[in-house]
Image (spheres, coloured by chain):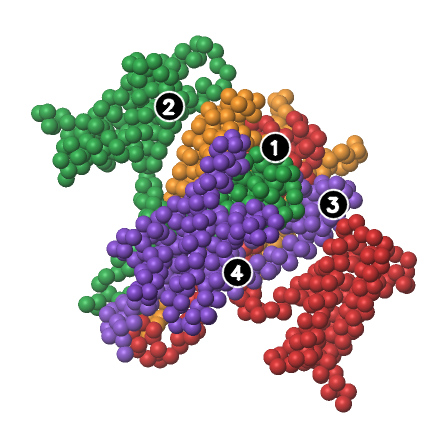
Chain colours: A orange, B red, C purple, D green
Amino acid sequence: MYRKVKKRIFEIIQAGKDGDIISKIFDFFIVFLILINVVTIIIETFDITPREKMIIKNIELVSVIIFTFEYIFRVWTSDLLYPELSRLKAFLKYVFSFMALIDLFAILPFYVPLLIPIDLRVLRLLRVLRLFRLLKFNRYTSAFGVIAEVFKRKSAQLISSVVVVGLLMIISSVLMYNVEHPVQPDIFKNAFSGLWWSVATFTTVGYGDIYPVTALGKVLSSVIALLGIGLVAVPTGIISAGFIELTEARKNNDKKEFCPYCGHKLD
Amino acid sequence: MYRKVKKRIFEIIQAGKDGDIISKIFDFFIVFLILINVVTIIIETFDITPREKMIIKNIELVSVIIFTFEYIFRVWTSDLLYPELSRLKAFLKYVFSFMALIDLFAILPFYVPLLIPIDLRVLRLLRVLRLFRLLKFNRYTSAFGVIAEVFKRKSAQLISSVVVVGLLMIISSVLMYNVEHPVQPDIFKNAFSGLWWSVATFTTVGYGDIYPVTALGKVLSSVIALLGIGLVAVPTGIISAGFIELTEARKNNDKKEFCPYCGHKLD
Amino acid sequence: MYRKVKKRIFEIIQAGKDGDIISKIFDFFIVFLILINVVTIIIETFDITPREKMIIKNIELVSVIIFTFEYIFRVWTSDLLYPELSRLKAFLKYVFSFMALIDLFAILPFYVPLLIPIDLRVLRLLRVLRLFRLLKFNRYTSAFGVIAEVFKRKSAQLISSVVVVGLLMIISSVLMYNVEHPVQPDIFKNAFSGLWWSVATFTTVGYGDIYPVTALGKVLSSVIALLGIGLVAVPTGIISAGFIELTEARKNNDKKEFCPYCGHKLD
Amino acid sequence: MYRKVKKRIFEIIQAGKDGDIISKIFDFFIVFLILINVVTIIIETFDITPREKMIIKNIELVSVIIFTFEYIFRVWTSDLLYPELSRLKAFLKYVFSFMALIDLFAILPFYVPLLIPIDLRVLRLLRVLRLFRLLKFNRYTSAFGVIAEVFKRKSAQLISSVVVVGLLMIISSVLMYNVEHPVQPDIFKNAFSGLWWSVATFTTVGYGDIYPVTALGKVLSSVIALLGIGLVAVPTGIISAGFIELTEARKNNDKKEFCPYCGHKLD
């Protein structure tokens, strides 16, 4: 009986299978609650009356209670999620998973102040991270899978290009600081200002709050901006190649038995 | 006789076949009229004399009358456009199609005020949307078809990446608001300001009207700007792969009979 | 004798074959002269003394005389450039070619004022366009050929995407003008201001001189900026596919006789 | 004995093989020292007390001494790095290699002032360039190799597109200067201001410190900004094709023995 109830609860709180209406309703309800919470966080940033503040507070209270029960149930059923592991290992693996940590930090700020007088209200913001749960919850899961696999396959090359860009950013920011600081001491205050300029230029955002005014600085900035084109071109090229190779690989998996061109049986 | 006239009108108002001179002239005339109307809408934004205003008003009046007849004819012949449907279904399908709705909204603002005293002049702007008709009307239709098919094939992956970007935008805007609001309360007024910053940074537009000034805000902004590179790289990779796969697929369709590699007859 | 001299002059002024030292020297000399002229145009924009101005003027005078002779010789030998055409046709074809027109406009501003009192000094700037001659004149000609062929093969698709972007720009600029003009009449003066905003946003340049301040305008701007990502992604995808197809096509041209995979003779 | 010691030192200072613990420790130590030096260069840009300055100076002194010994050892063992060359050639090849020159410039500023009274402190910044040593020193070396090979294979095409962009920049900057100088003489001071605008527009950085205000200037700027899209699209396309071709080429190298399609033995 106990095991049956536990298994049923597990089925409900996990992403629902086709036909399991109750599980689907639960999923929708939780996602709806997450969205409501994001909306209240957004509304709170506007000028609101005390009465509206009261309503939002109550919504948050109810949400936290529900999220708490959800979290407890997820932890409780973690051994069913990883049936191949021992109870303790499954528990630890789940509790320290990225999604579970977000779930915990989303409810913690309401309980900690009851024990110790510390203001953790800012952690409430972590509830917006629960939005990532939506990714699991739509009909594009397989498309996500393809994108994720491309990133995984090409991770070494992508990390390599990020490392090169990181080095160029550090080097250019130090050089730029030394070139511009004497002329604009208030804008290029220290190497961090240089790094901020470097990011804005490499990514071609160019807010316009910081830019070189000396001739040498402009030359350096031009070089960095042009290299910034490579910052787009190289990962794009890597990712393009990844998508095409993946399609090839899948096609080849489908054609193991016969030559796809002339139909001769493959040995 | 009635059916013959109706069929001829249908032929004329639809994009003309080769050799059907009258239909071609009609098409050019309507496109010319749309362009004239767009030009008048643009001219009206400049300082013009009352006399020029009068001329524009007359041009618009004539255009609306012609567009009205065109619309009536299109609705009337909708059963010829969808011969496989019943008269009513064809009528409904056409009337609620995207292009027909634009056509209706382009002429409605001139008739509604005659019945009820309401100012719909702003809806006149919808006439610029009729410019999309030009897409149907050029020798690049097949090239458009290729681009459209790539988007259709890859829609799931493209939507997935848009969803991820959307989530990142909401999350980063809420975080940024909370980081920057205390320091720049007039710039980061509420979560919508954060969203506006988020769009400007992700897309690397960077107008410069809103940007972080705190160290934490700059770090967050740098992360978002660098992720913004992915915003370009991922859809570009998807679309590249789409174009290449489509070319492959078409080539394969052309080579059904013989193996292009060794010439063996295909079974 | 006359034909021989003409033929020799033709060989010299055309891009030199390997081993033809005089032709190579001539090519280098002309490119050097073009570069010198571009440098003088750049120097003239700085504050310079009357003496320096004098030197520049003399350099320009000598250059124009040499360019004039070069132009005359090119026109004179145009029948050798297009031996399959009649003399007159070859003459007309050359004189109205893009490069010849640039060459003419580069020297004309010095002769016209001698006949009629009109200031054509501004046309001198066209001499910078002669820099395009450098494209013909380097060891990367075949690489240029590849890029050019990709653009040619994919021209229909590229033009299609440009047409769509053009329509979106016109439509968004008219809408934006109507949204923002009432609030910022000095910034969004007329539909052209809207178009200027539209270009800055679509291309993600975002100078920061013009941007929406109303909520509706910001929403519209966000949509345009996100569509602007497509402005990069679509042509990049098209061009990527073009490069890959071209490589494939060239590979296939090389393997007409034998199956490249198993070496069996193709029937 | 001497040769054995020399060989051992060579093994230690070169990137360590698996299992050579001492060499690995040395590599880590040098990289650690480079990072420390970059951090001190960054810290020096902030307001620091004389005592902190003293500490940094000592760290730098120790680093330079170690870097000097490293440099001497590297020069000394250069004949082992290029065993196929004569001693002198190996020495010259190493000393004038890019990495060795950076290493030299990183230590020189500390020795030159001892001989002649000249302030070379600014050259110390070159020590950040030693960060490039990190590239050799990670588990992604093969991924770097792939990226580097793509750039090498496609260098002709990439250089071609850079040349075209360079020409367009020079031409547009001269034209823009002449269009905007009369209206904004303080912003578009000379052709270099035009070039600075040209870079900001082509790369879509758009800081907002310089932009056209005349109608003609805005038209020219729009054209340049739209061509700037091509600045991203063309190299991205080239690099995408490069990555895909490289994967193809490697796959083909792996399948020399049997036709992967029909299994026929390859001759």
Kindly identify the amino acid type of the residue bearing the numbered disc 4: Leu
- Residue in view at x 25 percent, y 24 percent: D70
Spot occupied by residue A80 in the image (x, y as percentages of width and height): 49, 47
What subunit carries mark 1?
Answer: D
Determine the CA span between mark 3 and mark 1: 24 Å
Q: Chain of mark 3?
A: C
Q: Secondary structure at mark 1?
A: loop
Which of the two labelled residues, at mark 2 and mark 1, occupies the earlier sequence position?
Answer: 2
Taking the spot 63% from the left edge, 36% from the top edge, the residue there is D184
Q: Answer yes or no: do the residues labelled 1 and 4 have beta carbons within 8 Å?
A: no
| Label 4: element kind | helix
**Is C71 in front, or is B39?**
C71
Q: Amino acid at mark 1?
A: Asp
Q: Is there one chain holding both mark 1 and mark 4?
A: no
In front: label 3 or label 4: 3
Q: Indicate the secondary structure of the residue bearing disc 3.
A: loop
The label nearer to you, 1 versus 4, is 1
Residue D34 appears in which quarter of the rendering? top left
Q: Which residue is mark 2?
A: D123
Q: Are marks 2 and 1 on the same chain?
A: yes
Q: What is the C-alpha distance between the residues marked 3 and 2?
A: 51 Å
Evaluate whether label 3 is on the same chain as label 2: no
Residue at position x 67%, y 41% in the image: C210
Q: Which residue is mark 3?
A: C189
Q: Which mark is residue D186?
A: 1
Q: Is residue A220 above or below residue B267?
A: above
